[in-house]
Structures are given as structure tokens and as C-alpha cells.
Amino acid sequence: MNVVIKETDIIKAANEGMDEFVNLFSNAILDSIGGSLTAENMAELSADQITLLAYIWLRDEVMDGGFVQLIHNGYGPFIFDNPFARAMKQWGLRDFSKLLYSARKLYNENKEEIERECSDEEFMALFERFPDFDDFDDTFVENEEEWTSEIAHYIDGHIDEFAKIEQ
């Protein structure tokens, strides 16, 4: 495993809060593979490391522009066509997993149209054309803090799956 984090950095991040703790690990994982996940470097990471990156990307996209933005920006296949929802259930985030399974159905029905290249104006119109995603957006935003906390607890309980800790 080529992800190394100093114990002092973990303690500092944990004291700053769950977001900092989770981001410390996700940033270290990204740094270990040169800053972006590719088909070539994906094999260098564990399933837990890839799942954490998926959560961070989903969280950032949905908090910024909802599931429509997530899908339009190309993350739909990574989130919905992989066992991400199952991994979240295994990590103990059952409600989040249920949300993902529900959103997957809507994604599968509309992905071609949402993923299409379009102007900024056409992109903004997607939100009006696909209001069914609004409930998923709202549920995620309302629960993001709790779910990120659960992610932090999972990392803490399985820390060796995410990084090698240096003194």
C-alpha cells in the first residue's frame, strides 16, 4: 500500500472534525495515485480506498449541484454502475445505500439525456426537466453530516484498509 499518513496528521485532523479526518484520507489516497483515478492506477488501490473516493466525489458534486450535476459531470457510471451502494450498506450506511438504489433507477431511465454535452443554459434547464432528483438531493443534504460522520467512524475502525500510519 502506497498511502502513508503521519499519526500526528491523523490526530490533528480528528481534532478539527470529521470532514478534515475524512478529507485527510481521501487526499492522501489521491496523492498516492498522482491526483486522479484512472483505469490504470485503480488496481493500486483497495476497494475501501476506491469507495472512499467515490463518496467524496458524490458528496462534493451533490452538495454543489445535486445528482443531476453528478451525472452530467460524468460520475454516474462510477457511482451507479459499480457496487458503491452495496459498499455503503456494508459500511453500515443503510439509509444512504437505499437512497443510492432509488436514485440508480432514475439515473438508468435518464442518463443518456443528462450526460449529453450541452451549453450552460441547457445544463441549467436539466434541473427543471428532472425534478424527481430534487428529493434525492434534499435527502442527501439533510443527512450529509451524519453520513460523513459514519464514514469517518468506518475509516477509524478500519484504518489499515485506507493507509499505512507512520509515527
Image (tube, rainbow, N blue to C red):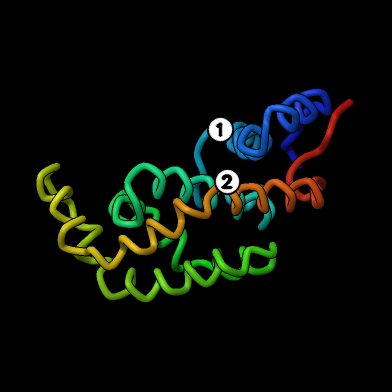
Residue ID for mark 2: 41
The crowding category of the residue bearing disc 2, from other C-alpha atoms within 10 Å (few below 14, some 14 to 19, many at least 20), is few
For residue 26, what is the image quadrant? top right
Q: Would residue 130 be seen by someone viewing this image from the given angle?
A: yes
Residue 87 versus residue 37 in the image, above or below: below
Percent of width and height locating residue 74: 34, 53
Percent of width and height locating residue 19: 61, 37
For residue 22, what is the image quadrant? top right
Front residue of 27/45: it is 27
The crowding category of the residue bearing disc 1, from other C-alpha atoms within 10 Å (few below 14, some 14 to 19, many at least 20), is few
Q: What residue is shown at x 39% (from left), y 57% (from top)? A: 138
Percent of width and height locating residue 65: 32, 46
SS assignment at label 1: loop
Residue ID for mark 1: 34
Front residue of 150/167: it is 150
Q: Residue furthest right?
A: 167
Residue 27 versus residue 109 in the image, above or below: above
Q: Earlier in the sequence, mark 1 or mark 2?
A: 1
Front residue of 112/122: it is 122
Task: Tell me the kind of residue under disc 1.
Answer: Gly
Q: Would residue 54 be seen by someone viewing this image from the given angle?
A: no
Q: Image quadrant for the C terminus? A: top right
Marks 1 and 2 sit apart, C-alpha to C-alpha, by 9 Å
Q: Is the C-beta separation of discs 1 and 2 under 8 Å?
A: yes
Residue 103 is left or right of residue 41, and the answer is: left
Percent of width and height locating residue 7: 83, 28
Task: Tell me the kind of residue under disc 2.
Answer: Asn
Front residue of 120/29: it is 120
